[in-house]
Image: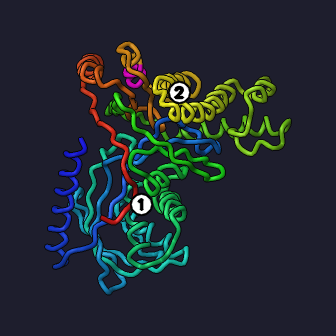
Amino acid sequence: MNMETKTNDMEMKTRIQEKFQTLFGSEGEIFASAGRINLIGEHTDYNGGYVFPGAIDCGIMAAIKVNGTAKVKAYSLDYDEYVEFGLEEEDVPQQPWARYIFGVCRETIKRGGKVAGFDTVFAGDVPLGAGLSSSAALESTFAYALNYIFSNGIDMFDLAKIGQATEHNYCGVKCGIMDQFASIFGRKGSLIRLNCKTLEYKYFPFDPKGYKLVLVDSCVKHELASSAYNKRRASCENAAAAIRKNHPEVEFLSDAKRVWLDEVRAEIPEEDFLRAEYVIGEVQRVLDVCDALERGDYETVGEMMYQTHFGLSRLYEVSCEELDFLNKLARKMDVTGSRVMGGGFGGCTINLVKDELYDAFIAAAKTQFEEKFGHAPKIYDVVISDGARRL
């Protein structure tokens, strides 16, 4: 995988520079950033809890050069589309992909950074729709690049916040900070435990000798995702508010103890209780996984992943038939850990698999899933890699 990835990186770099030369008559500086996985800690970010992401060896790469005008001239290799736009608020481009670049420019300017016109060609190899955050990789590439090129001296945390604010203000997605954080701060061979309330973070070495981390992509996306997401968020806030009456120090649901939730069970809808029960358990599971990793205990890591899947499926109710099927199959085949990754209602399971079981598990996942659902899942091996950087 690593050798292949290096080759792919070189190929992508060559393709980008060739197109840049054709369009703009010179070469640009090359910047890149990464997509991300999250090992554990799902739906905890907006509850002020912990997440545990890492950057992966798929991402976005861009050639960039200042052009001496007040315009950005951007070409997407993947969409085969060229766009020009100015840097004022009213210059927002129509193309969704260009809005990410425009948003990063605007958010940088709002923070006192300098941005002038530039030429860019970019491409990516983050599988779309697999929940690996290609949008955060795009934002982080340009946030990092503009900061470097214009010597703005904006700190790394603010670069992540520039990406998050781009989603909020220009792309209509009220996301947490995790995706952009992982994309900016990613470090090869390490996962990052981030406290979403305090933004304190710590790197944990992740080098599972004898195991592989693999995504099995169901290639389905069920429609209710955004409305269901907002409903669950409201349930969590409702439970936290009920607990706060007895325990004023509870700012977010992640601050609550499980027994405090039991105290208010009669006062809140059963649905809100179940959602909160999942979140409080998940916050603790992230800490348990970190402890297990420091001992090199991957069996405990895997068991926690299964517990998370159970919680997401039964208590939080964001799984679906396809993901539950993949999770049960993993359990049946002695896969160490497996769970739905991301918001749910489709997408991927993330699986921790012993090397000697890998081939059999992948073969079974492909054939049995196709027999039941009429199409094969896609398989992505995960290598934990570096985040935003200049190449």
Residue in the image at 40% along x and 25% along y:
323
Question: Which kind of residue does numbered mark 1 sit on?
Answer: Ser
Label 1, secondary structure: give it.
helix
- Tally of numbered discs: 2
**Residue on which disc 2 sits:** 308
Image x and y of residue 166, in percent: 48, 62
Question: In the figure, residue 78 lies in which quadrant?
Answer: bottom left
Query: Neighbour class for label 2 at 10 Å: few (<14), some, many (≥20)?
Result: many
- Asked if residue 18 lies left or right of residue 237, the reply is left
**Residue on which disc 1 sits:** 140
- Asked if residue 6 lies left or right of residue 40, the reply is left
Residue 195 appears in the rendering: yes
Q: Work out whether residue 67 or residue 228 is closer to the camera in this orientation and state it.
A: 67
Q: Work out whether residue 301 or residue 150 is closer to the camera in this orientation and state it.
A: 301
- Asked if residue 370 lies left or right of residue 261, the reply is left
Instruction: Give the residue at the far top of this rendering.
Output: 332
Residue in the image at 38% along x and 78% along y:
86
Residue range highlighted in magenta: 321-327
**Structural distance between the alpha carbons of marks 1 and 2:** 29 Å
Image x and y of residue 217, in percent: 33, 33
Q: In this picture, is 199 found above or below 382? A: below
Residue in the image at 66% along x and 35% along y:
235
Q: Quadrant of the C terminus?
A: bottom left
Q: In this picture, is 326 found above or below 92? A: above
